[in-house]
Image (cartoon, helix red, strand yellow):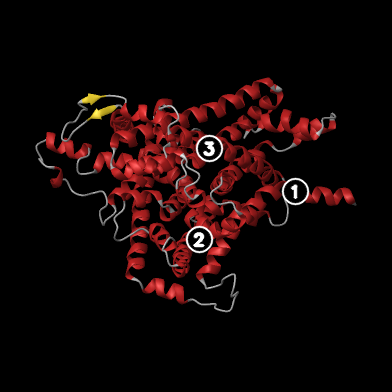
Amino acid sequence: MFGVKKTQLTPYIYLLPVISILLFVFTLGLVMSIFQSIGVHGDSGFENLTVEYYREVFRSGGFRSGLFFSLRVSLISTGIAVIIGVGLAYLLVMQQREWKILQILLKLPIIVPHLVAAFIIFTLFSQSGILARIGVLLGLMEHPREFPGLIFDRQGVGVILAYVWKGTPFIFLIVYQVLRSIHGEMVEAARNLGAKGKDLFFEIFLPLSIPSVFSTFIILFAFSFGSYEIPFLLGPTSPRALPVLAYVEYIHPDWMNRPYAMAMNMVLAGISVFLVWLYHWVFKKFRRHNWEGRSR
Amino acid sequence: MKKQTSRAVLVVVALAFILPLMIILLWSVTVSWPFPDLFPREFGLRGLAQIFEEGSRALESLYTSVKISLWVTILTLMITIPGGKALGIYDFPGKAFIKIFALAPLIISPVAIGMGIHSTFIRLGLTNTELGVVLIHIVPGIPYGIRIFTNIFELVGNQLEEQGKVLGANSFQVFFHITLPTILPGLISAGSMIFIISFSQYFLTFLIGGGSVITFPLMMVPYIQSGDRTMAASYSAVFIVVTLCGLLAIEKVLKLYYSKSSGIAGAFYTRKKVKS
């Protein structure tokens, strides 16, 4: 009897350390954020429960434009990264050779921290950057001022470029692994049946790689949506990206501003969680209506 | 698309991603590169010399960074290997939930988590300490560790470990001579990923480290902000080289260990992999 119990407990014992850390740092951090955002404090407990902070945050123009800025920048940068990354993966998998050197070189941006990525975009695209210098060489401009201000600009072009530079190799590597495992037999079979390049891409590679493309999309989106470094270094002062805005509120000398920071954080987290839920929901539908129907 | 065209596109796009890195390396050994020159006017080692000066703050911060990231890598591996094993081999109530839970740090912003836990860390005296920084760095690495080890344990199962036990090996022997060698490929990729994530962390370090724990990224940011390209580029170059060395070291150490332990496990792994 004891033996049975012990083996049933085994997986939980194995999971205990990692779950403890997650509970202590991650979950507690999340719960504390939620509590502070709805006015729950150590001293007063649940007495002053309120959604006032959320209401006020949504009323502020700075927050709304920041939210819009973050959403736009993350969507555009992740979208571009996915298109280039998938395209590269497809082109590479169709080559006869594996091109190990190309794969290794494309891994480099992954190990480069976001801070360095921000600096790279700065050296390339600032008004005295490499691109502006090429512009002078080609006789398109003479003075740095004539180069469009892509860094610190209100549209967030610099931020987008940095995320694209970091994100594309990530997408490429993951999708390439998937495509390579699909390659081989299935492609041979399709070719024998008369499929050409375009058919292969749209009928085999795309549908089979879509689940991993989408999950990487969500990971990258959530990352760029919720991270601080790049918009802090390359973004405009107005509108400010949400994580930057939240931190500004957080370090405000008046402690009463902290709940606003927490409310912003929760909106940030909520949107990312909603996306994951949407992903699962879409794939459930997708699988039920499309995949199984097709394969039968 | 024709073969030549697709090859050309591949090369051009890959270059677009790699060339910027080369430009950074060039900046790191440049003293003077005024606008609108396309090439540096004067080379020199001002930036690198300042970093590698005896007893410089930069070197000290580099040491702190490497120390913290190595601890984070070791600790995260120690907790995600058994975690991944549980999720990869066993079936138990709550498994689906825990799988999602362990991946949640990928989705929920570290900014939110860091600010939420900050006051608790202050109360526990964990802010301004390296221990606090290590603890907060572990969180973003967990999803990668769990995902990689879950996949690998699903692939290799635990029959080999069971055989070892039947033959009289104790738990330690089983773990070090069978489990570790079989999961080696995952150990390398998870270890590298966790090391990179911790090593390049900026926000969580300055929030929890509170200015007392100075890591390399923290030293670098003022130079990026002030636009001192030679210094920022030197920091970037050192950063990239140290990361590459770190990854290479992780791989070499593990492979060395692997070649010394029994080769059976490795053979088992490759056979399984080929089959699947």
What residue sits 26% from the left and 39% below the top? A124
Q: CA distance from mark 3 to mark 1?
A: 26 Å
* Label 1: chain letter: A
Amino acid carrying mark 3 in the image: Phe
Outermost residue, top side? B260
In the rendered image, is residue A246 in sight? yes
What residue sits 50% from the left and 54% below the top? B107
Please report whichever mark, 1 or 2, sits nearer to the chain's N-terminal start. 1
Of badges 1 and 2, nearer the viewer stands: 1
Residue at numbered disc 1:
A13
* Label 3: chain letter: B
Relative to A260, is B138 above or below?
above
What residue sits 67% from the left and 52% below the top? A20
* Label 2: chain letter: A
Relative to B213, is A188 above or below?
above
Tag 3's secondary structure? Answer: helix
Residue at numbered disc 3:
B195
Residue A273's label in the rendered image is 2
